[in-house]
Image (cartoon, rainbow, N blue to C red):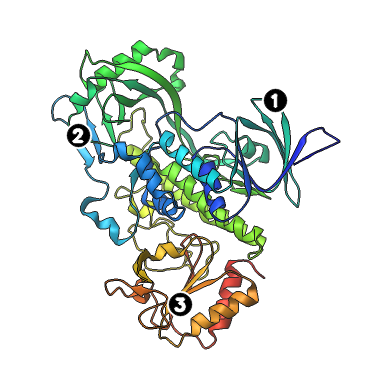
Amino acid sequence: MNRSEATGEIGHRTPVLIVGGSLVGLSTSLFLGRLGVPHTLVERHAGTSVHPRGRGNNVRTMEVFRGAGVRQRIHEAAKILSSNNGILQTPSLVGDAGEWLFRQIDPGGGLARFSPAEWCLCSQNDLEPVLLEAARELGGDLRYSTELMSFEQDAEGVTARVKSRETGEHTTIRAEYLVAADGPRSPIREQLGIGQTGPGDLFHNVSITFESRDLAAVVGDRRFIVCYLTSPEGDGALLPVDNGERWVFHAPWHPEHGETLEEFTDERCREHIRRAVGVPDLHVEVTGRAPWHAAERIAERYADGRVFLAGDSAHEMPPTGAFGSNTGIQDAHNLAWKLSAVLDGWAGPGLLDSYDAERRPVAEATSARASSRSVEHSHPGYSPEPGAGGPGGKRGGILNVALGYRYPRGAVLGADPAVPVVPDGLRLTGEPGSRAPHLWLDRSGDRISTLDLYERTPVLLSSAGALGAWHTAAARVAERLAVPLASYRIGEGPDAELAPVDGEDWAAAHGVTVDGAVLVRPDGFVAWRAEGTSEDPESALRAALATVLDLG
């Protein structure tokens, strides 16, 4: 720390400044901390979220949290809702009317074939404290009650001015890069003049938190994630907080018709919930309310110089399916390893251009699916135009959206640019641009997933007993390019670092022969693969790695 004589402000330097301390900002801090990147986070609010929302964490999000070492903590925070599954749609909760849109998130346990992780129902107010604690344990400088006042950038970095909302003290922060995780109304995006595409606002709700000593008996053993109540006299969405006395109800709100928030009095909220549930004298004690807006908007670009948009500042999408928060967390995961690689000097700055090339198409395809899902679920307050949901908003499962999305362009080599970003089905067979396949391996007596190999460095997989040409090439390329490339030989025998479990064929699973090799990025996506042998494996690997990492 030093004090500027010219301004009288305290000066602070950091490689990365994160603006926004909600789910995406905290995830960015966590991932950077895992990679050893010093950073500072500022958040204008005094603490983490207190409102139960954003509860659905999909399997890909739980994979990256598993890699970051917080999976078990999240499950502990989420245990109160661990028995809740499925989505119910019904005119009321009295009687047996209605239908389950689906009963189980993972019926039959088929997800285990694709991932070592699972879906997890953990509300934002429970998840954020876990991320905050873990980020601080890793050395993150996280400053709440601190507001960004202004920023400007030049060729070498970003200068930001922030203010403590507790003391009024101003601080000048100099960072090499800035991550804007400052929400859907992002002042940073606005200052950069980055426009947005998409249909805009779709519908509006008021989220009402309430307590009821009677509702659990009415719900009975129907342990849903959300229940869409469709009575014309009281439509809305009911979500359990503790399956007992605490609940959340999303009521339609129509500001486009002149309806104000002030009209949502406690009495109106109580009566609306009673009509929706179907019990006229239901005990309801309103404890809070918060407006929210469902929209479909995508930033026209995700970066401007040394400033990067992540989460809601980059994309908005309807909450149905929890795609927005998950997409934002995965933005952070994609960006963190690239910032780390460039800051540590083993990648060129052009690697950061791939962030927009990869993540923006994912948001476009995912937001279309989210809008389509809102139509399927008849979300309260949503009266879509015919054809709403757009291209890619197909009816059906969501595992291909959550786990099967791919990067046809970006920091990948050999990907097919004609392949849809979100395919119709789930295919994880080692194609460049897709998430690398999950297989169980034995490492010196420990059972691990292939996904456990990826976090801090690029990884080359090849077969043991295949003359070791790729493994030898990896060591030479790592030295010559000064890249921390890890190399693992899979198979049986003394040369193998890893052994397949249950007779799995790692090469076939990754789309190569026993003489081939697969290069996987730190985020677990396949960067390149050689399907078979090469006359000059060292040259082939060096060229691929240099291209992916922008090493000239």
Report if the CB atoms under discs 1 and 3 are less than 8 Å apart: no
Give the residue pinned by disc 2.
Answer: 222
Asked whether the viewer can see residue 392, the reply is no
Say the numbered circle drawn on residue 168. Answer: 1
Give the camera-side residue of 70 and 269. 70
On-image quarter of the C terminus: bottom right
Q: Secondary structure at mark 2?
A: loop
Report whether 381 appears left or right of 164: left
Image coordinates of residue 70 in percent, x first then y, are 43, 49
Q: Secondary structure at mark 1?
A: loop
Give the residue pinned by disc 3.
Answer: 517
Question: How far is the residue under mark 1 from the one under mark 3?
Answer: 57 Å
Disc nearest the viewer among 1 and 3: 1
| Amino acid type indicated by mark 1 | Gly
Location of residue 27 with respect to 340 vertically, above or below: above
Question: Residue shown at 53%/31% (left/top)?
Answer: 47
| Amino acid type indicated by mark 3 | Ala
Asked whether the viewer can see residue 469, the reply is yes
Location of residue 24 with respect to 510 vertically, above or below: above
Report if the CB atoms under discs 2 and 3 are less than 8 Å apart: no
Question: How far is the residue under mark 2 from the one under mark 3?
Answer: 49 Å
Report if the CB atoms under discs 1 and 2 are less than 8 Å apart: no
Instruction: Looking at the image, tell me whether mark 1 or mark 3 is earlier in sequence order.
Output: 1
Image coordinates of residue 176 in percent, x first then y, are 70, 50
Question: How far is the residue under mark 1 from the one under mark 2?
Answer: 50 Å
